[in-house]
Image (cartoon, rainbow, N blue to C red):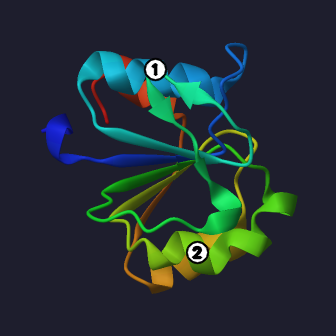
Amino acid sequence: MTKDKKTVIIGASPNTSRYAYTAARMLRDKGVPFVPVGIKTGEVFGKEIMNLREKPFIPDVHTITLYIGPKNQPEWYSYILSLSPTRMIFNPGTENVEFMEMAEAKGVEVLAACNLVMLQTSQF
C-alpha cells in the first residue's frame, strides 16, 4: 500500500523542469506521503523543502529516492542512512556502487531504478 510508504526526496527542487519535481508531483497524485529535502529553497506542492545541510530528523521513512549525483552523495551518506529507510531508489544518473553497498550492509533494499517509471507502472 503506497500510503504507508513515506518517501524522502533527496535533491528536491521547486524547478518544474527537474525530475525531482516530477517525482513529487507523481507521489502526491498517487497519495504517497513525501518529504522534500534538498539544498534548494522553496516549496513543492505546498511542502517546504527541508534544508539538507541541517540534516533534518524525519521519522518513519520507508523510501529514499535520490536525485543527487554520485559525486555529491558522500557528504550525505551518514545522514541518509541515519533515516533508517526500508528502501533506497537510485534513479538514473545517481547510481553509486559504494553507497549502494553501504545501504545494503544496513539491511536497506537497494534499487537502481526510475522512481517515475515505478510509479507509472504500479511497481512502487
| Mark linked to residue 107 | none
How crowded is the residue under tag 1: few (<14 C-alpha within 10 Å), some, or many (20+)? few
**Could you say which is closer to the camera, residue 110 or residue 49?**
49
**Residue drawn at the location 16% of the way across and 37% of the way down:** 3
Judge whether 44 appears above or below 73 on screen: above
What percent of the width, then of the height, locates residue 124? 31, 36
In the rendered image, the residue lying farthest to the right is: 71
What percent of the width, then of the height, locates residue 37? 57, 48
N-term mark: 2 or 1: 1
In the rendered image, the residue lying farthest to the bottom is: 105
What percent of the width, then of the height, locates residue 82? 47, 79
Numbered disc total:
2
| Mark linked to residue 79 | 2
The N terminus, quarter of image: top left
Query: Tag 1's secondary structure?
Result: loop
Circle 1 is placed at which residue position?
45
The answer to which image quadrant residue 21 occupies is top right
